[in-house]
Image: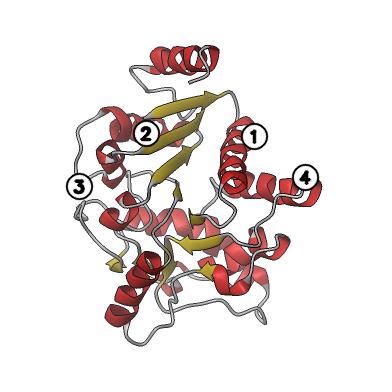
Amino acid sequence: MDIIIRDSYEEMSKYAAGKIAEFIRKKPDCVLGLATGSTPLGTYRELVRMHKEEGLDFSEVRTFNLDEYFGIGIDLEIPYNQDQSYARFMYEELLKHINIKEENVHVPDGRTKDPEKYCAWYEDEIKRVGGIDLQLLGIGRDGHWAFNEPGSSLASRTRIQALAKETLDDNYESFYKNAGIARDQMPHFAITMGVGTILEARNIMMIASGKKKADVIAKAIEGPVTSQITASAIQLHPGGVMVVLDREAAACLANRDYYIYAEKIKKQYSL
């Protein structure tokens, strides 16, 4: 596991975007797993800049998003500040700014009438394209990945998940409060990739920023593997794993100095 620490959110975002771009250039038809939330915004904006200014080509890239609220879906006729779907978030913040093909974009459909059947189909679609090459992840304040709330099985698959109070509180502040939507009107369930699904990605990049994430990042990376912190499952991944943090998010890491040294020495020896 490579732990990369940068001084600021902006530097962290540029580093993460640069690694994703490097991946796309090496494999133009790669399959990316994408995340929503405030943390990836800087990464997405840097990818958009690289597309517009450096010609980063997304024409053959395929994407699968981690999650979506259950009961809603993208509606481009609704103003952006009133449409709280993750599909709309991805469209506005990334997809409409790059040359990705519509048929290559996959975001769970929160409007499905048969969630069990739909979730099985989503899993099959990931397998059909050969699996996810690089999965981008954030981390919740309680240590969750996607909407895999504390207590979720580390072998879980794509499914409907009830949202924890802390998740509802965080998402209300980020997505609903400014839209004038009452807290009790926001969705209390979501479709989410499972932890087991995420771990099948060949490569994982987890990003985090800010003081509020420092304690849980340390638990996820350096603590015991536990279903109470689903992001701790990152320790079980056998392949390429990178955790990209700003200095504030790295503040509680016991081995922080070693991680900084390890990156320096690997660069020195071109490893």
Question: In the figure, residue 116 lies in which quadrant?
Answer: bottom left
Q: Are marks 4 and 2 in contact (CB under 8 Å)?
A: no
At x 23%, y 59%, the residue is 156
Q: Are marks 3 and 1 in contact (CB under 8 Å)?
A: no
- Dot placed on the residue nearer the N-terminal end, 2 or 1: 1
- In what element is the residue under mark 4? helix
201 relative to 223, above or below: below
Depth check, mark 1 against mark 4: the one in front is 4
Does 120 sit left or right of 21 as displayed?
left
Give the Cα distance between marks 2 and 3.
15 Å
Give the Cα distance between marks 1 and 4.
19 Å
* Residue 189 visible here: no
At x 67%, y 82%, the residue is 77
Question: In the figure, residue 259 lies in which quadrant?
Answer: top left
At x 39%, y 65%, the residue is 126
Q: Which residue is mark 2?
A: 217
* Residue 77 visible here: yes
User: Residue 218 at what x, y percent from top left?
Assistant: 33, 29
Count neighbours of disc 4 (C-alpha within 10 A) and say few if under 14, some if 14 to 19, many if 20 or more. few
Give the Cα distance between marks 3 and 1.
31 Å
- Dot placed on the residue nearer the N-terminal end, 3 or 1: 1
User: Residue 124 at what x, y percent from top left?
Assistant: 34, 71
The quadrant in which the N terminus is found is top left
Does 143 sit left or right of 79 as displayed?
left
- Label drawn at residue 68: none
- Dot placed on the residue nearer the N-terminal end, 3 or 4: 4
Q: Which residue is mark 4?
A: 54
